[in-house]
Structure formats: structure tokens, C-alpha cells
Amino acid sequence: MSDDAVLYEVADHTATITFNRPEQQNTISGPMLSSLTQMLLDADADADVRAIIVTGTGKFFCAGLDLRGSDITSNLSDGQRAPANLDLRNTPPTVLHNLDTPTIAAINGSAAGYGMDLALGCDIRIMADSAKLAAAFTARGVVPESGGTWILPRLIGWSKASEIIFTGKTLLAAECEDMGLVSRVVNNNEVHARALELAADIAKNAPLAVQASKRMMRMGMNENFNDHVHHVFLQLLPLFQSQDFKEGMASFMEKRPPEFKGR
């Protein structure tokens, strides 16, 4: 299901989505947005996929949107107004946020604008030591349009998020790690391997339980404690009936590694 600009591969319970426009710094064109959305949905629907890695080829993770030839830039060059209404329901950031399958951003190189928001939208981030996150939105006359204003304050607090967004700051890898924006910083040539290792660690566990845990974490961000505990209990009921629950208990009692099937 790959195309030249976005590559898609599934191996060892892991789907890897790779931006493949190194000459254009892996900027995302309009058609690539549709491809990315479909790949994320397909990976989430694939029972064999237990983790999703998003990464790029070359020196960039993603340098943002490629707006050349788009309706927005065409209208602006003609002196017209930009579109006032946008359908965001099936755009990558919205789809990414609602996936049940765990997502890992393997930030192989710099991520700017849309690319930064996309990386922040993943559950886990592993970053190359030479990579940067560039919040260049206000310097372009826009806001973080792909979830950054929602995600960043929740990750690092209001004050630090405000400084980054208001000033259009570029963050080095060490700064990202210190702030907790990424799980770990590794050598450039280790990013993909470390992401695959992490995906394999996730894939060893019961996928239904992992997916339910992610749903509960996502819901918990907007719930009070009592409502959340109630929803957690409702998630437990079908898990208790699953084959994976029985396998998890049996493997524990028999002191052997479990073999989960996702059923």
C-alpha cells in the first residue's frame, strides 16, 4: 500500500510509515495527507499490527506541510481569502489521536511545524541527538494547526508551552529530553533500531489490554477520577472474557512467556 512519497511496511507485528521525500525535507503534500490518514487507519484495523512507527528518510523527520499548489497558496497569490471551513475529521492529527494501536515517533531528523505536531501526537517519541523540534508557527502567521496547542501544554505545562509557541522556538534534542517531550535521545544511526526494539516490547504484551490501556489514558485526560474508574471497570469486563487474559494467567502460573493472539 506504499506510494513513492509515503512508504508502508508491516513486519513482526509493527507497521512502519516512512515519509520519503528527502530532497524536499520530507514536507507533506496534499496527497500525502490522504495517504498518511489511510495508512494509519489500515494499521489500526490490522489485527497483526500491535505498534505503529512513524519516521522519515534522510536528515529530516518532517519539515512541515508542502503548500505549493494548494488551494490556500493559490488563493493567497490571487489576492483571495483562504478557505474559511476545513473538514478536520479525517486529517492525520485527528486520526492519530484516536488510534487504539500504540504509536512511536522515530524522530530521525528535524521536525518543524506540522511535523513537530505530528511527532507530539504520537504516544512515544525517540529522537536522534542531532534532531530538532521547531515550533515555527507564529513566525509564519499561523497557530499550531495540528494539535500542538492541545498537546504541548499537557506534556510540559502552560508556562513552558507558552514560551515555545509564542516565540516560535527551536528545541535541541537535549532540551526536548530535559522537558520530557521525548522518551529518550539516541545516536543518529540508532533511532530506527531503538524504535523497533520498543515496538517489539509492546508487541509481547496482550494487544487487547494494551489498546484498552491507551483508550483509558486518552479518556482519563478529560474525566474526573470517579468516572474514570467506572470506565476502567467497563473495559475490564470484556478483557476477562478474552483468550489473552486466560493465556496471561496461565503463563504466569506456569512460569513461561505468554503467547498472546489478540483474541
Image (cartoon, rainbow, N blue to C red):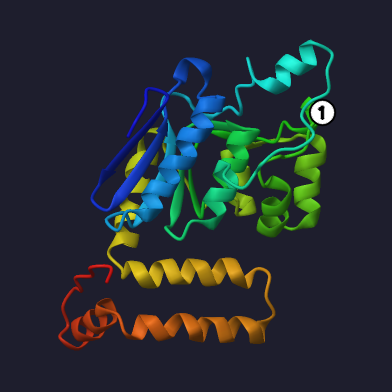
Q: Position of residue 208 (x, y in %)?
A: 36, 70
Circle 1 is placed at which residue position? 141
Left or right of residue 99, residue 248 in this image: left
Q: Position of residue 11 (x, y in %)?
A: 24, 46
Dividing the picture into quadrants, the one containing residue 85 is: top right
Q: Nearer the viewer, residue 202 or 214?
A: 214
Left or right of residue 70, residue 182 in this image: left
**Which residue type does callout 1 highlight?**
Gly
- Quadrant where the N terminus is found in the figure: top left
**Residue at left offset 67%, top offset 53%:** 151
**Visible residue check, residue 199:** yes
Q: Position of residue 86 (x, y in %)?
A: 71, 38
Dividing the picture into quadrants, the one containing residue 192 is: top left
**Residue at left offset 23%, top offset 68%:** 261
**Visible residue check, residue 130:** no
**Residue at left offset 65%, top offset 57%:** 155
141 lies above or below 121: above
Q: Nearer the viewer, residue 244 or 185?
A: 244
Q: Dot 1 lies on which element?
A: loop
Q: Nearer the viewer, residue 154 or 27?
A: 27
- Quadrant where the C terminus is found in the figure: bottom left
Query: How many tags in the picture?
Result: 1
Left or right of residue 138, residue 131 in this image: left
